Image: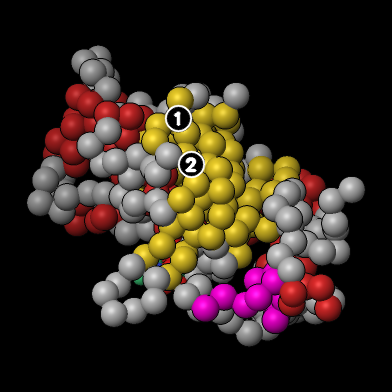
């Protein structure tokens, strides 16, 4: 049974005097307990909006989100729902999850209190993320970006979430810290039995930690599958293009191929398959009709 089930989720951003921006346009996604799902796609594809709707930070317009077996609400969780403490999020900018004016130990203690945990100490949580317990008395600005992200992970895990969401948690870190922080998040989430939804535009890191990958394009999930399968044999032309865009450390000077064009404006999406204007394999039908959702949502692979 899924821990998190997002079914045909629609999220509009509304700004007065402007057309609504449909950032999530009917996306479905599942995360099981103890599973790591990597949600990938270019900037602007709606990944953060989907995550924020799951956490109740953004209201959903349609579809359903269920969490821990119960239909939480048709239109997403609300900020004050107690279930929300069971979902913790780590953001790209650790200052979005950490208060710069409070000692980190006090912030981790908030999480422990939320979980009713009287045994674990903030210092103990710091050790779990690879930092000395004695640092609990320091403030966030006394740490490097990678250390701050470790602290944000400790604070999130202190609340004993059953679902941890990382929204581009490694994008602001340098390359050496990226894989370390991603692996730490994976290991700690899995150890505690929580599910992890890890959002990144960096497929090479997602590959290291995810059991399953979901590829998002302009508000829709266009391909999902086990990481090894997607890596070895991507089927959707968008997934193929994302993989071709990864720099290869092969020493042969192989250059990554840039994706052609930009993600279109979600306020005015293309007809038919949303990827067709950028797709090297587009056929007539692609501009006219939307492909059905499924493991691969593409006219090259019509459902049997
Ligand atoms: N508050 C908002 N008001 C209006 N439009 C928004 C708002 N937030 C996001 N958008 C738009 O919604 C679309 C999806 O944005 P979102 O941040 O969810 O994508 P993303 O895939 O997470 O990208 P990134 O990695 O850059 O955060 C974009 O076109 C963005 O400009």
Q: Position of residue 24 (x, y in %)?
A: 50, 59
Left/right placement of residue 290 relative to residue 116 reads right
Q: Which mark is residue 71?
A: 1
By secondary structure, the bulk of the magenta-drawn segment is best described as loop
What is the distance, in whole Å, between disc 1 and disc 2 at their CAs?
A: 8 Å
Task: Tell me where the magenta segment starts and ends, as one range.
Answer: 268-278
Above or below residue 159? Residue 281 is: below
Query: What residue is shown at x 37% (from left), y 65% (from top)?
Result: 13
Question: Does residue 181 show up?
Answer: no
Residue visible at 35% across and 26% down?
Answer: 160
Task: Return the x and y of residue 144 as percentages of the image width and height.
Answer: 30, 57
Q: Give the quadrant of ligand 1.
A: bottom left
Q: Secondary structure at mark 1?
A: strand
Q: Position of residue 159 (x, y in %)?
A: 30, 29
SS under mark 2: strand
Quadrant for residue 302, please give it.
bottom right
Q: Nearer the viewer, residue 149 or 1?
A: 1
Which residue matches tag 2? 64
Q: Position of residue 12 (x, y in %)?
A: 41, 62
Looking at the rendered structure, which numbered label has been put on residue 219? none
């Amino acid at each position: 049974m899924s821990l998190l089930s997002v079914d045909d989720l629609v999220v509009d951003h509304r700004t007065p005097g402007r057309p609504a921006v449909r950032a999530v346009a009917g996306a479905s996604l599942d995360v099981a307990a103890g599973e790591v799902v990597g949600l990938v796609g270019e900037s602007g594809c709606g990944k953060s909006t989907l995550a924020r709707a799951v956490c109740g930070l953004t209201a959903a317009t349609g579809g359903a989100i269920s969490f821990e077996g119960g239909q939480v609400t048709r239109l997403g969780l609300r900020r004050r729902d107690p279930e929300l403490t069971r979902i913790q999020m780590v953001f790209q900018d650790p200052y979005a999850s950490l208060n710069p004016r409070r000692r980190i130990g006090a912030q981790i203690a908030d999480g422990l209190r939320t979980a009713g945990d009287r045994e674990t100490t903030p210092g103990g949580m710091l050790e779990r993320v690879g930092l000395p317990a004695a640092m609990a008395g320091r403030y966030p600005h006394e740490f490097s970006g990678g250390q701050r992200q470790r602290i944000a992970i400790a604070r999130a895990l202190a609340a004993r979430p059953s679902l941890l969401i990382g929204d581009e948690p490694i994008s602001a870190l340098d390359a050496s810290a990226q894989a370390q922080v991603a692996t730490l998040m994976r290991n700690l989430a899995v150890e505690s039995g929580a599910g992890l939804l890890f959002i990144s535009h960096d497929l090479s890191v997602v590959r290291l930690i995810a059991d399953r990958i979901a590829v998002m394009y302009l508000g829709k999930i266009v391909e999902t599958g086990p990481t090894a399968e997607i890596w070895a044999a991507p089927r959707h032309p968008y997934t193929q293009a994302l993989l071709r865009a990864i720099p290869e450390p092969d020493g042969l000077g192989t250059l990554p191929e840039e994706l052609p064009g930009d993600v279109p404006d979600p306020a005015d999406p293309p007809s038919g398959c949303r990827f067709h204007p950028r797709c090297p394999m587009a056929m007539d039908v692609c501009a006219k009709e939307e492909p059905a959702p499924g493991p691969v949502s593409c006219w090259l692979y019509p459902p049997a």
